Amino acid sequence: ERYLAKVKALLHRELAAENGASNGCSGNGAYGSDEDSERAGEEDGTLEMEEAAASSSSSSSVVPVPRARKARRSRSNGESKKSPASSRVTRSSGRQPTILSMFSKGSAKRKSEEVNGDVKLEVSVEKDEEEELDEKEQDEKRMKIETKEGSEIKDEITQVKSTPPAKTTPPKCVDCRQYLDDPDLKFFQGDPDDALEEPEMLTDERLSIFDANEDGFESYEDLPQHKVTSFSVYDKRGHLCPFDTGLIERNIELYFSGAVKPIYDDNPCLDGGVRAKKLGPINAWWITGFDGGEKALIGFTTAFADYILMEPSEEYAPIFALMQEKIYMSKIVVEFLQNNRDVSYEDLLNKIETTVPPAGLNFNRFTEDSLLRHAQFVVEQVESYDEAGDSDEPPVLITPCMRDLIKLAGVTLGKRRAVRRQAIRHPTKIDKDKGPTKATTTKLVYLIFDTFFSEQIEKDEREDDKENAMKRRRCGVCEVCQQPECGKCKACQNMVKFGGSGRSKQACLQRRCPNLAVREADEDEEVDDNIPEMPSPKKMLQGRKKKQNKSRISWVGEPIKSDGKKDYYQRVCIDSETLEVGDCVSVSPDDPTKPLYLARVTAMWEDSSGQMFHAHWFCPGSDTVLGATSDPLELFLVDECEDMQLSYIHGKVNVIYKAPSENWSMEGGLDMEIKMVEDDGRTYFYQMWYDQEYARFETPPKTQPTEDNKYKFCMSCTRLDEVRQKEIPKVAEPLEEGDGKMFYAVATKNGVQYRVGDGVYLLPEAFSFSMKPASPAKRPKKEAVDEELHPEHYRKYSEYIKGSNLDAPDPYRVGRIKEIFCHIRSNGKPNEADIKLRICKFYRPENTHKSMKASYHADINLLYWSDEETTVDFRAVQGRCTVVYGEDLTESIQDYSAGGLDRFYFLEAYNAKTKSFEDPPNHARSSGNKGKGKGKGKGKGKGKASATSEQIEQEPPELKVPKLRTLDVFSGCGGLSEGFHQAGVSETLWAIEMWEPAAQAFRLNNPGTTVFTEDCNVLLKLVMSGEKTNSLGQKLPQKGDVEMLCGGPPCQGFSGMNRFNSRTYSKFKNSLVVSFLSYCDYYRPRFFLLENVRNFVSFKRSMVLKLTLRCLVRMGYQCTFGVLQVGVG
């Protein structure tokens, strides 16, 4: 733009000259000769053209380019090109050119020639269109040049400048990104002959810090540290390159060579050093020494050691000198701000300008220009310094001087310099390679995930929404954003939830987002200036008065019920505000720093304790697994209630139940507002019940009151009573009495009945086996190891095995109930609170003398019969299982095991005394395998027990349910779908898999499935736009077609094995979770399953998991999550 502006100004001057205003034109505006016009333009425009040419980025080399004039004519007016310094009117045109025609012409050719000490700019313009068509076969164009000495004609061959689109970009190195034709590009000259490889160099005795009489390291967990001098850094192609340009961050392999010296050697000469070659690749580079010392220490980290840089080699010294200035600049800034956090930018500048650089550098003073030039690097180092600091340490980044520096220099916060450099230096490459597609989202998912995946989600006009822009100010990802409000600062005390007025819309001072603290610091100061400050003692006095006013409580009407000493009321008046049973209130906590509690009043009464009410508590979203990602106005029902005094009530609030819409399944993908209710400080909503133990969100249970308890009905109390009753162990069907015991046929626990002869799960500590498994023998350490045969043996310095099966908890014990009894008390009644079971033990393969190795080759459902018996407490029972004799089965063992859960079988009996396996006894082979419900040897109770033993327990018949129509996204070859097929619950009708080989495998495994081999974002966009088929004519599923949605979004970005999970490709893979949730929001299936790796739970401080649950809850789904160990996926 600056270049075009100069060209336009020059054309205006040339046009004025040709109109007769100056430079040899006649008074009536007649034109002079071509030569006169050219000379006039040259004299007026030489300086402007030289400046314009200097600002252009085009090459100045002059070579003949044949037949380039036709390409020049295709230029558009908006393209950046050189314009002529003077325009010559051709004799054939016979008319004055306009400014538009000047811009439409091709680029002028210029040549600077020095004649008698004067520099003249020779300009040639193309001829008009007819002349170009006649001369298009010419390869060269001749110009006539008249010098001051005379009319000497020279033939000059000039290059026709190519248009910008046709310009060939100079080749660059694919590693270091330096121009290969750059004369400043230097190559590494190579290593000396005696240079050693890094592993061999590290074992050199000259680098050892121990002598022969001292012990060495006891652990190899810490990397050794050395110094390196006369170093050079280069890439794989041998190009010397700087290491601070983001190459290491982009995982470009850089190496370095030099003389390695011990860590205690401060002499930078080569004496005493070990020459090393191709050290690396460099995994990281770092700066240390922020302790007031003179020098900033720069270091490299490789896979084998840490190296501190001393002096560069002669060939690398110019490159390293450019980096030292900003490195020392960052050291000065960090050290100055460590103890001076309230200084201004002028104070920082004065510190920098008065600091003398260390000796040996190529500059002698620091200036403001150098600070602004390296501001981006300095700020990034300050950010890194803050990240390494303690959590209670205030960040240096938000100090006034740093905020001013960020504004003056235009520093970009929160982005890696490598990414920014790539975006600036290679715009053409980015435009050509668009990379992964943006995530297609519904509006609901977009509003929730926009802050987290702002660069991966496809933007539209919604981004201009002012409210959403305000929401994106807080990142919501960092640890500070996710912690709860402190309840102590001024901002918290003004919030409605803490009993304040809510006038100040300030966030908690402890939750200031560090990524945006710099920008918000100034805004908060402006807002705080507009808030009238009130003296804190007066404010505390008002709060106490408010509590005292609440003590004015009076009942409205007569008691509706009298129950013992309690008189129940329907209404109460608290400070002129009437409350009824069923209203919701805010309750002042004992601790004023905590937010107000919210509850529903289920009963009100008066007794000796005073005026009371029963509160059924609501749980705010911030107290659930959602944390700070939850809607601040959303509450959840929980099974918690309490009796409280009416004086604790702070005020009346409105809590609305948002029930699912009747047409819920067809409302997916609509532009729904994320706000459910308006925020007036007293209105909230709930739509789910929350299980705090299992982090489950469920539809609120429906419990209706009766006429007898309507005046004091509490859903929480009712459900808690039901749970307690189920948990209480009970016995039923009593049998005969004997030996001070009462025998029973049935025991019940948690709603499950256990009968004599049933198989049961027991806690591992319920009983032990007479055969103790042998502990695994420790392998003796080998004194001498052949390093050629075992070159990696030195790495194994301990016997620790990560994830060893020996650290896994023991499985449940399995037993068969032989007797159920209770001891008889002294009063002659059985103690039914203490239920005992007589158990016959079953051995697992690992419980035998063969130890753990026996389980490696045995079926996981295989047991061994045993005649050993023991008595256990009924509370040790954890569940019921089925154990049968394998020879009695009418089907194969595989079909039997796959036919249901908790199925075991035995084929042999185990004798622990003889350590032998035997045939099971006849009574073990009997069908049903029921025992006697009586005491041993008494012969009593045979009637009922015999009837029980003859009964064969029949499992409940399987329910025949229709298979769910399933869409499998990111299907792969169909592993996840196959599991649902084997379970018999789904039928996969559609699958999406972008990788063609996997999609073809899915087609072969599931011939009746429509497999889309396309990007899931493209397909979703088609469906959302109303398309019925894709580009191949395949029918797309529509709303109401999908009953189950399953999928495992790519896990590369979450996997702990991926050390590059912060790169753009991994971020795109992570954003596919957003696309998958948008499928769920659009189709609204009955069931939804998302599967991923273990790190999905903890990635980015669990933010992805929390936002996923937040989306599903907002959609109206009952949902939970779990970390499972189910073997190989």
Image (tube, rainbow, N blue to C red):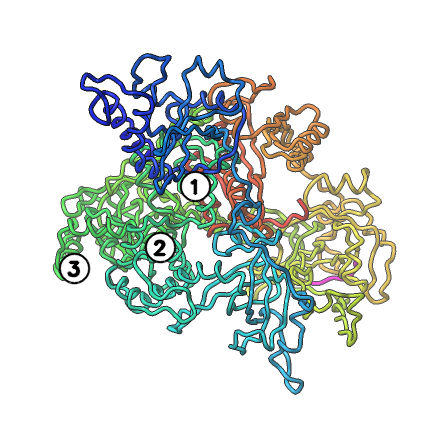
Q: Start and end of the magenta stretch?
A: 866-870
Q: Secondary structure at mark 2?
A: helix
Classed neighbour count for the residue bearing mark 2: other residues with Cα under 10 Å, few (<14), some (14–19), many (≥20): many
Q: Position of residue 535 (x, y in %)?
A: 12, 59
Q: Nearer the viewer, residue 885 or 705?
A: 885
Q: Position of residue 540 (x, y in %)?
A: 16, 59
Q: Say above or below: 787 vs 882.
A: below
**Image check: 127 left or right of 831?**
left
Query: Is any part of residue 570 visible from this angle?
Result: no
The quadrant the N terminus occupies is top left
Q: Which residue is mark 2?
A: 375
Q: Marks 2 and 3: CB-CB under 8 Å?
A: no
Query: Is any part of residue 751 visible from this angle?
Result: yes
Of the two numbered discs 3 and 1 in the rendering, the one whose residue sits closer to the viewer: 1
What label sits on residue 1110 in the rendered view?
1
What label sits on residue 999 in the rendered view?
none
Looking at the picture, which amino acid does disc 3 mark?
A: Met
Of the two numbered discs 2 and 3 in the rendering, the one whose residue sits closer to the viewer: 2
Q: Label 2, label 1: how many angstroms apart (C-alpha)?
A: 39 Å
- Secondary structure mainly formed by the magenta segment: strand
Q: Position of residue 440 (x, y in %)?
A: 47, 31
In the rendered structure, does residue 478 fall within the stretch colored magenta? no
Looking at the picture, which amino acid does disc 1 mark?
A: Arg
Q: Quadrant of residue 257?
A: bottom right
**Who's the residue at 40% across and 61% down the image?**
325
Count of numbered labels shown in the rendering: 3
Q: Secondary structure at mark 3?
A: helix
**Image check: 189 left or right of 12?**
right
Looking at the picture, which amino acid does disc 2 mark?
A: Ala
Q: Which residue is mark 3?
A: 540
Q: Nearer the viewer, residue 201 or 940?
A: 201
